[in-house]
Amino acid sequence: MRVIATAGHVDHGKSSLVLALTGTDPDRFEEEKRRGLTIDLGFAHTTLPSGESVSFVDVPGHVRFLRNMLAGVGAVDACLFVIAATEGWKPQSEEHLRILELLGIEHGLVALSKVDAVDDDLRDLAQLDVTEHVAGTFLAGAPIVPVSASTGEGLDRLRAALDDLVRSTPASADRGRPRLWVDRVFAAKGSGTVVTGTLTGGPLASGDRVVVGPRVLPARIRAIQSLNQAHETIGPGHRVALNLVGVDHADLARGDAVVEPGRWVPTVRVDASLAVLDALGHQVTRRGAYLAYIGSGEHPVRVRVLGGSGIRPGERGFVRLHLQEPVPLLPGDRFILRESGRQETVGGGAVLDVAPLRPASKMGSERWEDGPVERVVADRSWIRADDLEALTGERVPPSLGPWVVAPGAVQAMVDALASRVEAAGPLGLDVVSLDEREREVLALLPAVEVRAGRARPAGTDDPLADHPFLQALEDGGVTPPAADGVDRAELRELVRRGLVVERDGVYFAPSAIHAAARTAAALLAGAPGGFTVAALRDELGITRKHALPLVTELDARGITRRRGDLRIAGPRLPAP
Ligand SMILES: Nc1nc2c(ncn2[C@@H]2O[C@H](COP(=O)(O)OP(=O)(O)O)[C@@H](O)[C@H]2O)c(=O)[nH]1
Ligand SMILES: [Mg+2]
């Protein structure tokens, strides 16, 4: 199964060829039929002699409907490039070829159409004309098949050539990350919202939960159709219709993406390469109103040239694009840039970074050739493997706990932590004071041991730091044991050193206070108006005997504040 887009100048016979090949008229609308002009995308499919099926996305050739052409070619595998032998190469032949190249389409074949209307000399001339124009592009060396939709001449050869094309075009890649760029939305009688599009990136199944569009509207797939047949699951590289439950068709539009929830970082700011067309008569600068065509969508963007003020025709540079609405993108996604004022295609390129950290003014010497994973990790030093995947589409095994860490960053933290432990001496470093990453690194320190919640240089002998009561308190958590039998002088010294917290005659490990603080934060997140001692007591599953001193300690630390019978947030309340 492959999805093939038509391309070429208006009136060169694209729609007629699709009709001749498939039996379906891709001009769906009454106005299109009446005017004999494709305005919007058309869809049709057929089975080739080999038994392989192909879907066609038939695009308009008229320059006025270029935006619809762009919506159709964003996700296809290959193209059927149509040139009328009667007219030869025309402006939109040229523009469509440039666009297909900028979108990274690498496979296609040429149909030399309407050969019934020319003599042999003209036919040969047209063939030569095409050969010259496609030289140096992905269509160089592609078969040029003379056909006539009117007489049927050459259609069998075209079908055979399509079979060869399908065989030599790799199947749409399955990266386990489905994304459907929506090109049609409608309400189907009895079944609700239906969206159609070309599925890429991975499979979808009925029952899957998805999110749609810039507002990330949640929906569920009730049913899937492809080539008019129902499917339980469908792989990438198919024309697909999804019946969605939970969203109104009026809230969706062409250009929206259907993706799995939580696995993408919809973005309004990307860094990208931009190849400016040779034929453009001026530099591309930040001045001007631009439209970026991404997937099936048209997005107004502001353009900022990185590391310079402009990119000249025929040159390649780097830009930051600011979108108005978030789009789920990944490095490698292609786009076409048009200037909306002058209505001209400026160029196109590939997304390089979907979450750039540095301001555009500080950009210029980026090592784009390093690839997205290396750059994202280098920019952040530490990133969770899940987040890295959402930003790059690539799953990298974590280097430490859930983290993927830049080379050298672990060692730097090992060194820093080792000196902090060293500086803390026999008292030890309170493990609660470490963040999640530092705690992962702590386990790597060879000469450090953790006892009673404190990290100390191994072998440090300090009878107080090793006091059995500390371990008992640590084990007791928010219901610590009483200090019965503990030497009073030792107890005072433990409190003085901060190893034990005393409040109203009850002794706690410092970690118990932190646990109570987190619980207080969670309670306040649910009830910002405040919570009672009884609420904290119940939440921790303890008695008033421990709850009261804990709350008093929280007040004393500014974590909470008393207001009547309630505790409200204090200045030092941690995140829940
Ligand atoms: N003589 C001749 N006319 C054709 C052929 N194919 C299409 N046409 C005519 O060319 C015009 C444009 O065809 P259409 O398929 O709409 O072109 P599109 O704009 O590229 O989709 C129509 O009037 C067709 O009847 C052909 O093979 N031979
Ligand atoms: Mg047409």
Image (cartoon, rainbow, N blue to C red):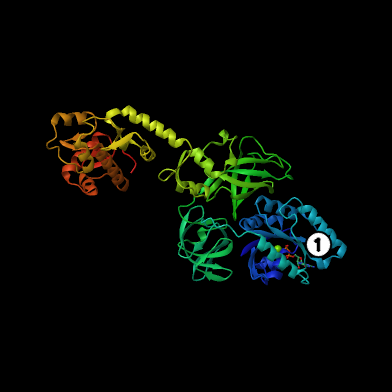
In the image, residue 389 sits, relative to residue 165, either above or below, namely above
Side (left or right) of 219 relative to 552: right
Query: Relative to the observer, which residue lies in front, 497 or 168?
Result: 168
Q: Please, is residue 27 above or below residue 94 in the view? A: below
Image position of 491 with respect to 206: above or below? above
Residue occupying image coordinates x 60% and y 60%: 171
In the rendered view of the protein, which quadrant contains the N terminus?
Answer: bottom right
Ligand 2 placement by image quarter: bottom right
**Other-residue count near label 1 (Cα within 10 Å), few / some / many at <14 / 14–19 / ≥20:** many
The answer to whether residue 263 is visible is yes
Q: Which residue is mark 1?
A: 85
Which of the 4 image quadrants contains residue 279?
top right
Q: Secondary structure at mark 1?
A: loop
**Direction left: furthest residue:** 485
- Picture coordinates of residue 455 (x, y %)? 30, 34
The vertical placement of 470 against 219, above or below, is: above
Q: Amino acid at mark 1?
A: Ala
Q: Using the rendered view, name the quadrant where residue 304 is placed.
A: top right
Q: Quadrant of the C terminus?
A: top left
Look at the image and tell me whether residue 571 can be seen.
Answer: no
Residue 338 image point, x, y percent: 66, 48
Seen at 53% across and 44% down, the residue is 373
Q: Is mark 1 within 8 Å of ligand 1?
A: no
Residue at image position (60%, 34%) is 365
In the shown orientation, is residue 565 left or right of residue 456?
Answer: left
State the image coordinates of residue 85 (x, y, percent, origin top left): 81, 62
